[in-house]
Image (spheres, grey):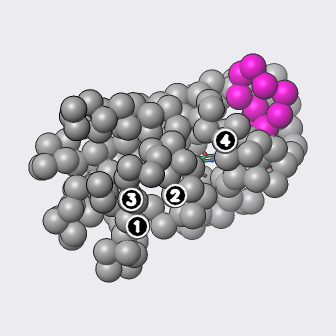
């Protein structure tokens, strides 16, 4: 089955393809001729995921899904949350985002944080939402070179290393996005039967 996934991020594509398995061929927006940035202008993860999947479906006419993720830090009242990608700058500057996060947590004892992903799937014109959460904590300096985004600063509960020190398989065992994608995969499998 071919399905469009609203990302041009190679890391994300690899993570999601690994969870969904070979039964699904993931197409990127670029594969479908959509080269402009897909708008995400809402104030919630649900709103953004939904806006992106509708935008892609309208452009391609194909079944598609989009995800939106935020890092929610307890001591910062849930920030950066839906603004995670543009926390420090207008662009997706991961290093600047990490620097700002560390600065905002300087001297703060409570390091609790969680990643939350929402997926919006548009299938045959109907929308389905799936959520995945991983709880953990923010450490005080970047550690590890794998992954992307806030991975070098986040240690999931039950582990002694950051997401950036894990292989794709290890990260997929617990990550927010993998949890949401597994729910998506279970749903797709259930309607095939
Ligand atoms: P997006 O909605 O998936 O693009 O995520 C928004 C922002 O959250 C990204 O630009 C990253 O900074 C951060 N983010 C999302 N997923 C992850 C992840 O798996 N690890 C680390 N940071 C992430």
* Label 2: how many Cα within 10 Å (few below 14, some 14–19, many 20+): some
Secondary element at image label 4: helix
Q: Nearer the viewer, residue 6 or 70?
A: 6
| Residue shown at the point (70%, 37%) measured from the top left | 170
Q: Name the residue tied to disc 3.
A: 25
Q: Is residue 46 left or right of residue 140?
A: left
Query: Sequence-wise, which precedes: disc 2 or disc 4?
Result: 2
Q: Name the residue tied to disc 2.
A: 13
Query: Sequence-wise, which precedes: disc 4 or disc 1?
Result: 1
* Marks 2 and 4 close (CB-CB < 8 Å): no
| Residue shown at the point (79%, 38%) measured from the top left | 162
Q: Is residue 4 above or below residue 175?
A: below
* Label 1: how many Cα within 10 Å (few below 14, some 14–19, many 20+): many
Query: Sequence-wise, which precedes: disc 3 or disc 4?
Result: 3
* Marks 4 and 1 close (CB-CB < 8 Å): no
Q: Name the residue tied to disc 4.
A: 169
* Marks 3 and 2 close (CB-CB < 8 Å): no
Is label 4's Cβ within 8 Å of ligand 1? no
Q: Name the residue tied to disc 1.
A: 28
Q: Nearer the viewer, residue 122 or 68?
A: 122
Q: Is residue 95 above or below residue 125?
A: below
- Give percent across and percent down for residue 50: 28, 48
Q: CA distance from mark 4 to mark 1?
A: 22 Å
In front: mark 2 or mark 4? 4
């Amino acid at each position: 089955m071919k399905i469009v996934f609203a990302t041009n991020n190679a890391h994300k594509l690899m993570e999601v393809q690994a969870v969904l398995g070979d039964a699904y061929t993931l197409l990127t927006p670029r594969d479908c001729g959509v080269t402009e940035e897909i708008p995400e202008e809402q104030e919630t993860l649900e709103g953004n995921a939904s806006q992106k999947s509708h935008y892609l479906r309208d452009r391609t006419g194909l079944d598609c899904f989009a995800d939106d993720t935020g890092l929610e830090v307890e001591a910062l009242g849930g920030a950066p949350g839906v603004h995670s990608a543009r926390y420090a700058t207008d662009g997706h500057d991961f290093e600047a985002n990490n620097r700002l996060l560390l600065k905002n947590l300087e001297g703060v004892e409570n390091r609790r944080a969680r990643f939350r992903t929402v997926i919006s799937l548009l299938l045959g014109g109907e929308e389905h939402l799936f959520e995945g959460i991983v709880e953990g904590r923010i450490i005080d300096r970047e550690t590890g070179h794998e992954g992307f985004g806030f991975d070098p600063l986040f240690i999931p509960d039950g582990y002694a290393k950051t997401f950036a020190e894990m292989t794709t398989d290890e990260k997929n065992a617990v990550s927010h996005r993998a949890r949401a994608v597994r729910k998506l995969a279970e749903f797709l499998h259930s309607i095939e039967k």
